[in-house]
Amino acid sequence: MAIVAEQSRFSRIFWPTLAWITAIVVFFPIFWLVFTSFKTDADAVKPEFLFKFTPTLENYSNMVDNYDYWRFAGNSIITSVFATIFALVVGVPCAYAMAFDPTRATKDVLMWMLSTKMLPAAAVLYPMTFLTKNFLGIYDTKFLVIVVLMLVNLPIVIWMLFSYFKEIPKEIIEAGKMDGVDTWGEIKEILIPLAWGGIASTALLTFIFCWNEAYWTVRLTTTDAATLSSLIEGNRAPEGLFFGRLSAVSTAAIGPIVVLGWFCQKQLVRGLTFGAVK
Amino acid sequence: MGSIKLKNVTKSFGDTEVIPPLNLDIEEGEFVVFVGPSGCGKSTLLRLIAGLENTTSGEVIIDGEDVTEVTPSKRGLAMVFQTYALYPHMTVRKNIAFPLRMSGMDPAEIDKRVAAASTSLNLNDYLDRKPGQLSGGQRQRVAIGRAIVRDPLAFLFDEPLSNLDAALRVGMRLEISEMHKQMGTTMIYVTHDQVEAMTMADKIVVLQSGRIEQVGSPLELYNSPCNTFVAGFIGSPKMNLLSGKAAEKYNAHTIGVRPEHLSISDVKGDWEGVVGVSEHLGSDTFVHVHFDGSSEPLTVRADGDLELEYGAKVYLTPDLKKLHRFDENGRAFKL
């Protein structure tokens, strides 16, 4: 009995301590980023001002006044929202078909879709740039960013929705068929209301992925369609100067998504651990 | 309206043929029960009629019209599922109204029909609840309600009572039979329970491995089963089947005697045996008698008051007029 008590006292102290250390290690860079964004560029690199400094909003006002923050933010919102909507518009019927009317090829199709995520993005950088710039003439347009973000995330969207739809008993869909509903009605009246939680988690995650995407948004845009990722990239001075400014831009870029994630924690956790229970 | 005809219908899943070519006529207004052991293809057959499975070949004809390629929603049939398959996000009222709403019916008419259905099924107190708040029996009523409001050509029931407890099952069985008498609509009912089949059906279809073994009224199947499978499947307790010497005496490869057609005596009789377990039901006593001529103990339906000691010697005599004879292929024949 004594050993058990001792062990439980040990674990009572050990595990929370470990959890706190992990949390601090993970959270520290974010904290540091926000912290630095309130320093001037000069103060940011001086060790003597590590914690003792005069906070300033100069970086933020500079960002809004001189770097057109709202345009970048607007582009980020528009491209992420529409890419998410289109990914769902394509993904829901696709996952529906595979979940409720599978053929022998369904598994292979799912694997094939996932395999597109294994392709290194850099490998298609040249054809993508060439095609969009010289051939289609849609380089640096929001349309292009939306299409690319949607396509990049579509495999994940379909996989997630497929797993959610699989949890819905087949008989309910069949009952719908017997009750005189056509395919569109099945999706609208039965599937979407039943899988609403799953669709919302998928939408949220897709939105976050779109918002954070940097590889393509930086490379396929210059000014008109540039998103917040491009704004951060543009403020990354190779000499390592302007840390204050860079931190302010980064904070302003991650801020909205952190707030969104905070409010939708429950949905997100379900989305990230989908399939874990089964 | 509501006659259903299957013409040379087959169904294969991959290379496995689950329904070999099959023909069946279901008359308008008939209560037909598909019965058979699990995996015999009875549910698949029902789903072929519903259109939830595609036929591999053959035709499904409803009211003289070939509907083989028609989607389930256009066949005019209603189905009640074993798992009820209610829409969990809708209230009982919305569940029942759903097929009417989908057909674009006038809301006032929908309300009227939902009210009529819920009254006849005693669901008035539950109309605003969701299926999750109902008991199994109530859910099944909702599922039936959802089927009857549409006034379908035929009802399809896929083992609708097997998720209910025994007492409820008997009650619902009666209600469904009553419903059929009142509405007179064609009903096809799938079950593995031969008691349900016997008590409810106008016509029983006994299936084994996707093949129809016999079609007939409950009493036809009971009185003249066409083979040993049907003989053993229909009737409860099941028919005693004896082969070998005991059967040869009656000029057959196998003979069958129902428990109610065996008389038991402690003085004299044709077969001498030893009493095993006696099951007292009050109205009847099922005596299991060990007999050398049979590998399994014979079951005798005896008087409810009969008291026999375990291990006592008894004599059994079959009623010759009710004896069933089968040849070496298990087919019934008459002398």
Image (cartoon, grey):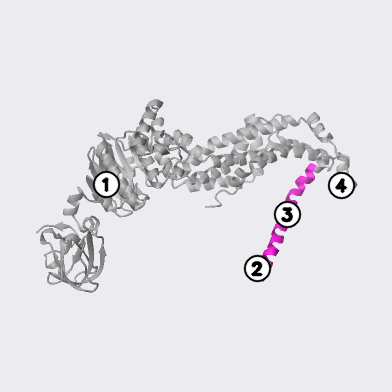
Q: Which residue is mark 3?
A: A20
Mark 4 vs mark 1: give the one in front: 1
Do we see residue A131 in this rendering?
no
Pointer 2 residue: A4
Residue under the point 52% across and 45% down:
A164
Secondary structure of the residue carrying numbered label 2:
helix
**Left or right side of A3 for A201:** left
Q: Is residue B1 magenta?
A: no
Q: CA distance from mark 4 to mark 1?
A: 84 Å
Kindly state the secondary structure of the residue where label 3 is placed: helix
Tags 3 and 1 in contact by the CB under 8 Å rule?
A: no
Q: Which mark, residue A50? A: 4
**x, y percent for residue B99:** 39, 33
Please state which amino acid type lies under the numbered disc 1.
Val
Please report whichever mark, 4 or 2, sits nearer to the chain's N-terminal start: 2
Element assignment for label 1: strand
Q: Image quarter for residue B73?
A: top left
Residues under labels 3 and 1: Cα distance?
Answer: 65 Å
**Mark 2, chain letter?**
A
Query: In this rendering, is residue A273 above or below B117?
Result: below
- In the image, residue A32 lies at what x, y percent? 79, 46
Alpha-carbon span between mark 4 and mark 2: 45 Å
Q: Earlier in the sequence, mark 3 or mark 4?
A: 3
Return the residue nearer the eye: B40 or B148: B148
Question: On what subunit does the disc labeled 1 rest?
Answer: B
Q: Amino acid at mark 2?
A: Val
- Residue B1's place in the image compared with B254, above or below, is above
